């Protein structure tokens, strides 16, 4: 599987469609698979495939798209790859909209395709229509990811319709940035300025209390990158809050492997939920051997941080229903070089929460200013290997790393390490959260990446604490640092430290003592997947 498609809540059921090859564990023959859930955690596969390539306008693949509730009933918009290898936009409706499971879908042949690549755009650069919204004029809008040939401009094209049947291209794009290449899987949604409640109001009268987010999946880097800004529904233009943080240099949802994500407004719990695709990090030959490849990340609630410039993400609280009795430790003092084994945490399905007290030398340093406009431009995230893994000769001082080893063999020859590290660089401190997989597996064919992102300290009331939550599910390690302000998802394939032989440690490899003030580890219940 790859991209999540068309998430929606309908008649008490969450629906998730996804890009799927029914015939092999490699990309190809792309259809829409379909799964349903009542809690976003326990999913059932729907026996019927939702959309398969069977029309001239999608015979080479039913690619990504979205769902919108229109007059109370869901409609799917998706990209078809035609018999002449052109990307076009299509529509499908439920065969029986009173079926809460929405098992069968009908392509609307009379209306398809409703959009073809406009001038200036290659036939292979026009895809992934967004969930539609209603503009000030009461007409529908949808947006399509694209690349304008001139200047390699990543662009989101806007379409308008009064009946959801005929769509016209608007002159104004929703957003565009030169030199950023193809923008896949665009997402565009409002976020409340205060609080965590989601919204689907695009009309503008609430502009004082909400901002807007544009997310695109950058084909060239494979990053899901987002920008927060204001949207003027009259001119239909989006204005980033910081020009220096526009697509290309923007923040990322996740600094690991997380792509083609898609959010939806969950009317049941009044929140915005984010789904994302986690690719494999091993070789395609291994995927073929095991017979499957790729997973969807645990759904995340997403909302605007108090700083109003960046987002926070947190696993949906429903995941907590899988937690079994916790192992807890308080005030664990870790000396330099100390590695503490967390007894009783053996297993490869864990939920871990840990709070570290910031080492004294750092906590009182007034230069710890995370500057949104400059820190990304200085390029720390682009060089995570050096900053997370190795020595960094330009650093004036380094504190840490300290953190957690998961999926570790008892002798620590295999370990997946999630940690914090402080670097003093050009007179100011930067805080990194990293996931270093260099020693994660004795297998020679697994990719052992090093991932990292900057952590903001200055925006917290409690500047003394660093927190991380880690969800481990066999090969998947999802990290949420500082309450979901920086996230990293990675894949780890240990040979020894797996299943019941997976151990967990807290460590301090830095030169100052560190205290883990709180540690809680839950083993997580297994989920049995069924079909319906
Ligand atoms: N995957 C789909 C495309 C999309 C890409 C094809 C992103 O629609 O642009 O499987 O991973």
Image (cartoon, helix red, strand yellow):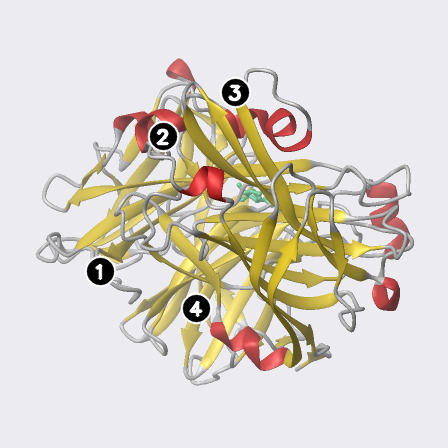
Query: Tag 4 or tag 3, which sits nearer the N-term?
Result: 4
**Secondary structure under the numbered disc 1 in the rendered image:** loop
Q: Kindly report the distance in space between the C-alpha atoms of the residues bearing marks 3 and 2.
A: 52 Å
Badge count:
4
Q: Of the numbered discs in the image, which one, if any, rests on residue 396?
A: 3
The residue wearing badge 4 is: 8
* Residue that mark 2 sits on: 118
Residue drawn at x 51%, y 71% is 15
Mark 1 vs 3, N-terminal side: 1
Kindly indicate the quadrant of the structure image that contains residue 243.
top left
Q: Residues within 10 Å of mark 2 (few under 14, many from 20)?
A: few
Q: CA distance from mark 2 to mark 1?
A: 39 Å
Percent x, y for residue 364? 38, 40
For residue 8, side relative to residue 63 (left or right)? left
Kindly identify which residue carries mark 1: 194
- Any part of residue 58 in sight: no
Tell which of 75 and 421 is nearer to you: 421
Q: Residue at x 42, y 33 (%)?
A: 146
Front label number (3 vs 2): 3
Give whichever of 195, 117 is nearer the camera.
Answer: 195
Give the alpha-carbon distance from disc 3 to disc 4, as whole Å: 49 Å
Q: Nearer the viewer, mark 4 or mark 2?
A: 4
Whole-number angstrom distance, CA of label 1 to CA of label 4: 24 Å
Q: Earlier in the sequence, mark 4 or mark 2?
A: 4
Ligand 1 located in image quadrant: top right
- Please name which of the two marks, 1 or 3, marks the residue nearer to the observer: 3
Q: Is residue 300 visible?
A: yes
């Amino acid at each position: 599987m790859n991209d999540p498609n068309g998430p929606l809540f309908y008649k008490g059921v969450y629906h998730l469609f996804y890009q799927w090859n029914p015939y092999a564990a490699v990309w190809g023959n792309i259809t829409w698979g379909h799964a349903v859930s009542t809690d976003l955690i326990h999913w059932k596969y729907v026996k019927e495939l939702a959309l398969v390539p069977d029309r001239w306008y999608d015979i080479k693949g039913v690619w990504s798209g979205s769902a919108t509730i229109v007059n109370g009933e869901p409609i799917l918009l998706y990209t078809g790859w035609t018999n002449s290898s052109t990307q076009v936009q299509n529509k499908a409706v439920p065969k029986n909209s009173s079926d809460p499971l929405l098992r069968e879908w009908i392509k609307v042949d009379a209306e398809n395709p409703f959009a073809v690549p406009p001038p200036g755009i290659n036939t292979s650069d026009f895809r992934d229509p967004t969930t539609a919204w209603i503009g000030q004029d009461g007409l529908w809008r949808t947006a399509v990811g694209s690349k304008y040939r001139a200047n390699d401009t990543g662009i989101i094209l806007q379409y308008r319709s009064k009946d959801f049947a005929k769509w016209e291209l608007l002159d104004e794009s929703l957003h565009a940035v030169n030199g950023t290449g193809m923008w896949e899987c665009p997402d565009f949604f409002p976020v409340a300025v205060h609080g965590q409640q989601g919204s689907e109001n695009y009309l503008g009268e609430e502009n004082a209390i909400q901002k807007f987010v544009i997310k695109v999946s950058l084909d060239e880097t494979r990053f899901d990158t987002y920008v927060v800004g204001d949207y003027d529904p009259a001119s239909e233009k989006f204005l980033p809050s910081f020009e220096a943080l526009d697509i290309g240099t923007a923040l990322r949802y996740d600094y690991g492997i997380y792509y083609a994500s898609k959010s939806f407004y969950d009317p049941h719990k009044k929140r915005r939920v984010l789904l994302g695709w986690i690719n494999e990090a091993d070789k395609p030959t291994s995927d073929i051997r095991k017979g499957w490849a790729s997973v969807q990340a645990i759904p995340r609630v997403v909302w605007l941080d108090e700083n109003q410039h960046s987002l926070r993400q947190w696993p949906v609280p429903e995941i907590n229903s899988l937690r079994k009795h916790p192992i807890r430790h308080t005030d664990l003092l870790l000396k330099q070089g100390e590695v503490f084994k967390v007894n009783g945490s053996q297993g490869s399905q864990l939920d871990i929460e840990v709070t570290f007290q910031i080492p004294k030398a750092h906590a009182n340093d007034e230069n710890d200013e995370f500057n949104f406009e400059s820190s990304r431009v200085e390029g720390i995230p682009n060089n995570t290997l050096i900053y997370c893994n190795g020595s960094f000769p330009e650093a004036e001082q380094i504190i840490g790393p300290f953190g957690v080893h998961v999926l570790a063999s008892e002798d620590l020859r295999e370990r997946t390490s999630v940690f914090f590290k402080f670097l003093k660089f050009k007179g100011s401190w930067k805080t990194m959260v990293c996931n270093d997989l260099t020693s994660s597996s004795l297998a020679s064919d697994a990719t052992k990446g090093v991932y990292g992102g900057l952590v903001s300290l200055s925006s917290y009331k409690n500047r003394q604490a660093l927190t991380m939550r880690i969800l481990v599910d066999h090969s998947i390690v999802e990290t949420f640092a500082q309450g979901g302000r920086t996230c990293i998802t990675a894949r780890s394939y240990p040979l020894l430290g797996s299943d019941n032989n997976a151990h967990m440690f807290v460590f301090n490899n830095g030169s100052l003592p560190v205290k883990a003030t709180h540690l809680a580890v839950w083993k997580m219940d297994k989920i049995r997947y069924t079909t319906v």
